Image (cartoon, helix red, strand yellow):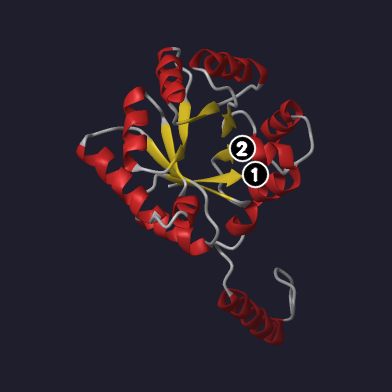
Amino acid sequence: MRLYIDSANLTQIERINEYYPISGVTTNPSILVKEKMHYTQSLQEIRKIIGEEKELFIQVIADSASEIVEEAEYFQELIPGKNIIKIPVTQEGIKAIKQLTSKNIPTLATTIYTPFQALIAANAGAKYVAPYVNRIDDLSGDGIRVVSDIIHLFTIHKISTEVLAASFKNVNQVYQACLSGAHSVTVAPEIIEKLIAFPATQRDVKVFQSQWNEAYGNEIGKEW
């Protein structure tokens, strides 16, 4: 189970990458625009922070398959390291996934709302599919059930494409996605930091420290 940072904020990415076992960073046009920096500079700076061995997900904005492929090749040349091209599951997007797969350019099928969308994208050659958990919930659907159904379909049909669950608003959704069998999750920095936050943990640490200091002082490795 891998954890990705869903952000383009350089300060947050640097902090989360320092403290947590991160496999890479996912971006999209909205996330990049939010940072008010030219997208090429943002992507290059993110790559510097995470290094070339971790995956960086970059989404295309073109509509036609030919333009999507052209855009994908541009990003592959521009940004060093392991890049994954994010492509929406439109008809042109599916066509582009097929073409990029033949060129050995890895892709993630994004904007997934149904298991069939994921199944078609996987059969087209997508390395990852990204079901939008919270956005599905907002449309009166069941985002976790969609994740679970995709995993079930991939398992019974022996499909190697991985599910990278996305769009979370709280820790419980992330937890349920992991329980459902998602291979990876991409999570906003503020939610990532909540994954290990629990009041009793901090309380216990304070008690341990207090008891130790009372008995031995606050130094270790010296004679008391």
Q: At label 2, which amino acid type do we have?
A: Thr
Where's residue 83, x and y in %? 56, 26
Left or right position of 36 against 130 = right
Marks 1 and 2 in Cβ contact (< 8 Å): yes
Tag 1: Cα neighbours inside 10 Å, few (<14), some, or many (≥20)?
many
Foreground: 135 or 17?
Answer: 135
Q: At label 1, which amino acid type do we have?
A: Ser
Q: Check disc 1 and report the residue beneath it.
A: 7
Left or right position of 76 against 43 = left
- For residue 36, which quarter of the picture? top right
Foreground: 57 or 96?
Answer: 96
Which residue is drawn at the image coordinates 42% and 24% (left, top)? 91
Where's residue 143, x and y in %? 41, 53
Which residue is drawn at the image coordinates 26% and 45% (left, top)? 152
Which residue is drawn at the image coordinates 45% and 28% (left, top)? 90
Q: Quadrant of the C terminus?
A: bottom right
User: In the picture shown, does residue 203 fall above or below 156?
Assistant: below
Say if residue 181 shows up in the picture. Answer: no
Label 1: which secondary element: loop
User: In the picture shown, does residue 202 fall above or below 90?
Assistant: below
In the drawing, what numbered circle is on residue 27? 2
Separation of marks 1 and 2 at Cα, in angstroms: 6 Å
In the drawing, what numbered circle is on residue 97? none
- For residue 193, which quarter of the picture? bottom right
Say if residue 163 shows up in the picture. Answer: yes
Tag 2: Cα neighbours inside 10 Å, few (<14), some, or many (≥20)?
many
Which residue is drawn at the image coordinates 64% and 52% (left, top)? 189
